[in-house]
Image (cartoon, grey):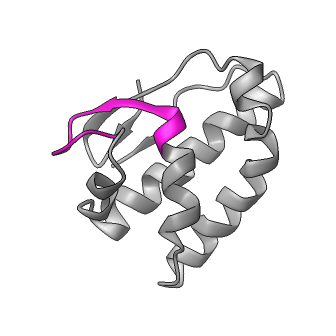
Amino acid sequence: MPKINGVNVEFRQKFPARENWDLPALLGKLSQIGAQAEDGKVDLQVAIPLLQRVVVSWGFEGSPAVADAYGDLDLFRELIPMITAVAQYIKSLSSGEAESEPTSQ
C-alpha cells in the first residue's frame, strides 16, 4: 500500500479489460498532467476520473470515489504525489514489471 504524505492509499489490484482497456493510453495523459501540475497548471477534469478508477481507499477526508474529494487535497503534498504514484503504478502494470509500491513523504 503506497503512502502519500504519510497517509495510506490503496490502489485497485485488478482491472477487468472490458472496463479498463484504455488505462495504458491514459498513462501518457496522466504523466502530462503531473508535469503541468508542477507548473501550477493542472486540469483536474482529466486527472480525477482516472484517479477514481485506480484509488480504492485512502486515509484522507472524503471518499476517493467522489470527485470533489480530490479538490480538497493539498496540491503539492497530496494531489501531485498521488498523480505521480498512480502513473508509476499503471506503468508498472502495463509493462508487466512488479515494482515496489510508490511512496511519497
Q: Position of residue 88 (x, y in %)?
A: 64, 42
User: Quarter-wise, where is residue 34 in the image?
Assistant: bottom right
Is 52 displayed left or right of 90 in the figure? left
Instruction: Residue at 73% x, 39% y: name it.
Output: 23
Is 62 displayed left or right of 30 in the figure? left
Q: Is residue 81 above or below residue 103?
A: below
Q: Position of residue 85 (x, y in %)?
A: 53, 44
Is 48 displayed left or right of 20 in the figure? left
Extreme residue toward the front, this view: 18
Asked whether 57 or 19 is in front, the reply is: 19
Q: Is residue 78 above or below residue 43?
A: above
Disc tally is 0
Is 8 displayed left or right of 94 in the figure? left
- The region drawn magenta spans 52-64
Instruction: Residue at 21% x, 35% y: name it.
Output: 59
Asked whether 22 or 2 is in front, the reply is: 22
Quadrant in which the N terminus appears: top left
Instruction: Residue at 77% x, 56% y: name it.
Output: 28
The answer to if 76 sits in the magenta stretch is no
Q: Position of residue 55 (x, y in %)?
A: 44, 34
Residue 76 visible in the current orientation:
yes
Q: Position of residue 19 (x, y in %)?
A: 69, 27
User: Quarter-wise, where is residue 46 in the image?
Assistant: bottom right
Residue 102 visible in the current orientation:
no
